[in-house]
Image (cartoon, rainbow, N blue to C red):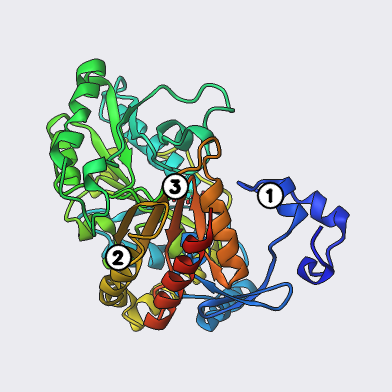
Amino acid sequence: MADLDSLAGLSPAELEAHWMPFTGNRHFKSDPRLFVAAEGMHYTTADGRSVLDAFSGLWCSNLGHGRKEIADAVASQLTGLDYSPAFQFGHPTAFKLAKRLADMAPGDLNRVFFCNSGSEAADTALKIARAYWRAKGRPEKIRLVGRAQGYHGVNFGGISVGGMVGNRKTFGPALDVDHLPHTLLPENAFSRGLPEHGGEAMANRLLDIINLQGAENIAAVMIEPFAGSAGVILPPKGYLKKLRELCTAHDILLIFDEVITGFGRTGSAFAAQEFDVQPDIITTAKGITNGAIPMGAVFASDTIYETFMQGPEHIPELAHGYTYSAHPVACAAAMATLDIYQDEKLFNRVREMAPYFEEALHSLGSESHVVDIRNYGLAGAIQLESRPGEPGKRAMEVVLEAYRRGILLRWTGDTIAVAPPFIIERNQVTQIAETLRDILQEVQ
Ligand code: PLP
């Protein structure tokens, strides 16, 4: 059991009461890791240590922590209009935020549907895609295509198109979905930025699915522009463009899940812009409010929205929504967050910092156990060789040791992911790399 200081005064009963998400509860509760405060680039632990946040919380606190502007906006929204019914009534900030987001989004993705998380955004997008084809008089177009190693949250739609077996296998039948192969190719190991090899060929695998199921039955392909949760798996050059071409040629909607890549992680507002590929729908969450208040947003094209605008005007065109869709407090947090991205030119900062970040990560390439390093913008992954019979254990040990030495990272399988807030300084990038180097030299 951990010492009292690190428990922040929690009783064993309190520790037991919280069933933690995506966490080995028994492992955690035998040695809890508790944060009690956060400011700028750092968390403070219950036992008073400062921990550098090299993971933006959980890919979400892109501006760093404790942003007063967001706190003030939230506080004044709570005392001004704490809640407003999401259905049949509105509040102005929702419309202002939607327009502002539409102005940032690529192409004609001008219609924004609000929800509360990336998982809800994924399921919302999939439902919009199916209902779109029905509204166009093609109700047979319902099949969905995802990708191996994809992560689209944890709801049934998301785990169906998602391709991380651990997240699906214990929950019984999901939707009947086809999956593209992932794009982690051995010949691309240690690529910097987008890998060179295999882009078109991997995208052409969609043709196998089309041949199997018939494009006339397929509603949409949903992928992350780069897979984040599976360990920063990047699309080889030409991959996304080819997928777009194939989707257009076969009347299939292309959905980008930008829950991680959206709001600047690549150096552009959206990865769609960074990679110059226009999807029909984008899903977002996380960085939209800097993680301070839950929110998700789905961006749909004008064409999609207009297709729904038929039938009696008093009947909801899309029978979907959440009590907390466009919650006033989340909208206020998002407005303040967008102000900061803009005022501090933080997407440019990602672009400026990215080469230094890339260099620092790749300097670890010759350390023991390292079998691949991948990076784009301020996202990076160091993949370790798995210990025989103990998949995931080595990376876990590295990340927990890094936490003891004052750096917050994340492991997924045997990959260590790095995704710092955009305000990170060079010396902090160096600190992350050098701490990892020391640990890699020691870990068995
Ligand atoms: N989609 C992607 C690409 C994600 O990375 C995540 C979360 O990491 C989600 C969806 C799910 O988001 P949430 O945990 O907010 O439901």
From the image, state whether disc 3 or disc 2 is nearer to you: 2
Indicate the position of residue 20 as horizontal and vertical percent values. 68, 49
Nearer the observer, 336 or 366? 366
Point out which mark residue 158 bears: none
Residue at 53%, 65% (x, y): give it. 57
Nearer the observer, 271 or 393? 393
State the CA–CA distance, disc 3 to disc 1. Answer: 22 Å
State the CA–CA distance, disc 3 to disc 2. Answer: 23 Å
Residue 246's place in the image compared with 196, above or below, is above
Left or right: where does residue 433 sit relative to residue 377? right
**Pointer 3: what residue?**
121
Task: Decide if ligand 1 comes within 8 Å of the CB at mark 3.
Answer: yes
From the image, state whether disc 3 or disc 1 is nearer to you: 1
Q: Amino acid at mark 1?
A: Met
The answer to which quarter of the image holds residue 275 is bottom left
Q: Amino acid at mark 2?
A: Gly
Q: Looking at the image, is mark 3 or mark 1 earlier in the sequence?
A: 1
**Pointer 1: what residue?**
20
User: Neighbour class for label 1 at 10 Å: few (<14), some, many (≥20)?
Assistant: few
Indicate the position of residue 310 as horizontal and vertical percent values. 31, 37
User: Neighbour class for label 3 at 10 Å: few (<14), some, many (≥20)?
Assistant: many
Indicate the position of residue 343 as horizontal and vertical percent values. 35, 83
Q: Are marks 1 and 2 in contact (CB under 8 Å)?
A: no
Nearer the observer, 66 or 235? 235
Left or right: where does residue 6 sit relative to residue 354? right
Secondary structure of the residue carrying tag 3 is: helix
Residue at 39%, 40% (x, y): give it. 150
